[in-house]
């Protein structure tokens, strides 16, 4: 059924938590460069991908952005928060992802984008020492301050709508507890200032939802993935999505694991290791932050392989994931996978993958797509968990009744079919 989609008129504020980070600055610089015609939006589905409409022999493959009412890049205004006060130009220089030439093309705009003071608590990200942070009497007060920031930003920049994107650091591992089970319990815990149960990220998420702004979780933080937040987002009619961008090693995993399973090959073990030298690598060097990432990275294989259905193939898989902080490589991560597979009559074989990638270069186009698609969902009246955006996440959010879909190409089909449905077109079984 076709959705009534409100037109993308006026400005869209993209408020980024962790504005000064490597991913965020690469996202902002790239978007500004693309809209000035200085660069190409490589890796972005919203800017480059086509979508078949009608029968194949009708040969109608328009670009998604030409048939789906997405916000024009010229109407996006950037802002956000960080624990360091650097403007985005200085942050991007510090991140060392992009060349000076690329930064200088949009220097004036970057100099003008400065972060608002952050909602931060060092107990939640132990390796960082923030200087540009809010003072608050409670988590509730912290959340109220963020709400005010969102309203003030909207007014100051003449924004019609806002999307809030978390691209800040990975917080320490937090299991689901009673305080997260209902909206009432969450609000009480924020007012009671239960600092060990309410992560700063939850204050941002609550504030965004309260202000009617879609919230996207790009890190593996529990944050918005709780019954309390699902309830709040449904109540407020706000779209939420997460969690943990699926960019490098896990993206490959969600392509290779379905291949192994489709051919009914067995799997004995999957060893994944990484070296990474940026600030994210430093944060993840802390075991408590790494635990959050590990849970996210490990969730993929079991769901795809369904060991309960195929115990003789996948009943005893040894799956290990490691991230090693190695400063010389900076943002240029190297990820190795050793995959021990099993063939006909039980004969072992091995697959080796060595992905020399660039973390923020892979993540930036996802940020752009997520901001534009979350805004679209909001205008189309779609609230709660946006599982059609699972394509972008390592740990796709889902409620207790559903199971997550990890296979990259099934996720992509779902994404396109949701877009087709939104504009009143027939859905397709093909990837087209
Ligand atoms: N790059 C990828 O491929 C990828 C993939 C999946 C997830 N991620 C996640 O995306 C996030 C960003 O990655 P990055 O490489 O840009 O890291 P980064 O360390 O360069 O950037 C994080 C930024 O967040 C800021 N920050 C931390 N806590 C904050 C808070 N409470 N409020 C506001 N700002 C805060 C830090 O000061 C820093 O500027 C990380 O959580 C990372 O795990 C990245």
Image: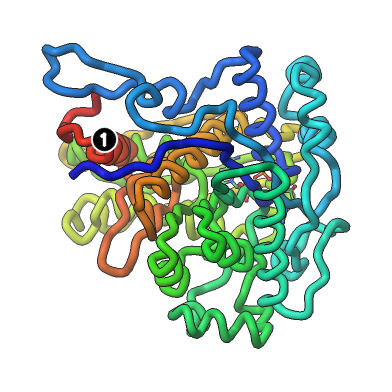
> Where residue 285 appears, x then y in whole percent?
70, 54
- Identified at 81% across, 35% down, the residue is 112
- Location of the C terminus (image quadrant): top left
Where does label 1 land, which residue? 423
How many other residues sit within 10 Å of disc 1, few (<14), some (14-19) or many (≥20)?
A: some
- Identified at 71% across, 75% down, the residue is 141
Q: Quadrant of residue 148?
A: bottom right
Q: Is residue 351 above or below residue 167?
A: above
**In the visual, does 61 lie left or right of 82?**
left
Ligand 1 closer than 8 Å to the CB at disc 1?
no
> Where residue 425 appears, x then y in whole percent?
19, 32
Please give the count of numbered marks on the rendered protein: 1
The answer to whether residue 62 is seen in the rendering is yes
Q: Is residue 200 above or below residue 50?
A: below
**In the visual, does 260 lie left or right of 338?**
left
Q: How is the image coloured?
A: rainbow
């Amino acid at each position: 059924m076709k959705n009534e989609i409100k037109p993308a008129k006026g400005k869209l504020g993209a408020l980024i938590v962790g504005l000064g980070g490597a991913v965020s600055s690469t996202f902002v610089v790239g978007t500004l460069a693309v809209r000035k015609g200085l660069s190409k939006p490589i890796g972005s589905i919203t800017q480059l991908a086509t979508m078949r409409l009608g029968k194949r022999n009708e040969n109608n493959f328009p670009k998604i952005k030409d048939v789906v009412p997405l916000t024009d890049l010229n109407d996006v205004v950037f802002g956000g928060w960080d624990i360091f006060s650097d403007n985005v130009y200085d942050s991007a220089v510090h991140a060392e992802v992009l060349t000076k030439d690329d930064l200088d093309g949009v220097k004036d705009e970057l100099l003008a984008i400065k972060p608002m003071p952050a909602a931060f608590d060092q107990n939640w990200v132990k390796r960082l020492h923030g200087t540009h942070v809010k003072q608050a009497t409670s988590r509730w007060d912290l959340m109220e301050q963020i709400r005010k920031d969102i309203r003030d930003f909207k007014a100051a920049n003449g924004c019609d709508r806002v999307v809030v994107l978390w691209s800040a650091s990975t917080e320490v591992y937090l299991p689901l507890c009673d305080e997260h089970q209902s909206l009432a319990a969450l609000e009480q815990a924020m007012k009671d200032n239960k600092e060990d149960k309410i992560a700063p990220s939850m204050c941002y998420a609550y504030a965004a939802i309260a202000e009617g702004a879609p919230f996207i979780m790009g890190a593996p933080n529990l944050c918005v993935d709780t019954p309390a937040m699902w309830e709040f987002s449904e109540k407020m009619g706000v779209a939420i999505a997460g969690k943990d961008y699926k960019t490098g090693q896990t993206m490959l995993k969600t392509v290779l694991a379905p291949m192994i399973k489709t051919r009914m090959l067995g799997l004995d073990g999957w060893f994944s290791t990484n070296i990474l030298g940026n600030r994210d690598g430093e944060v993840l060097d802390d075991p408590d932050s790494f635990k959050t990432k590990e849970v996210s990275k490990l969730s993929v294989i079991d769901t795809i392989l369904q060991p309960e259905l195929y115990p003789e193939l996948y009943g005893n898989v040894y799956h290990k994931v490691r991230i090693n902080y190695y400063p010389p490589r900076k943002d240029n991560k190297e990820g190795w996978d050793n995959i021990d597979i099993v063939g006909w009559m039980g004969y072992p074989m091995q697959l080796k993958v060595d992905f020399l990638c660039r973390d923020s270069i892979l993540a930036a186009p996802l940020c752009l797509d997520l901001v534009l698609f979350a805004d679209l969902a909001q205008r189309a009246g779609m609230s709660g968990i946006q599982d059609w955006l699972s394509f972008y996440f390592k740990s796709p959010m889902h409620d207790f009744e559903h199971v997550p879909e990890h296979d990259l190409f099934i996720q992509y089909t779902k994404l396109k079919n949701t877009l087709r449905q939104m504009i009143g077109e027939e859905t397709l079984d093909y990837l087209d």
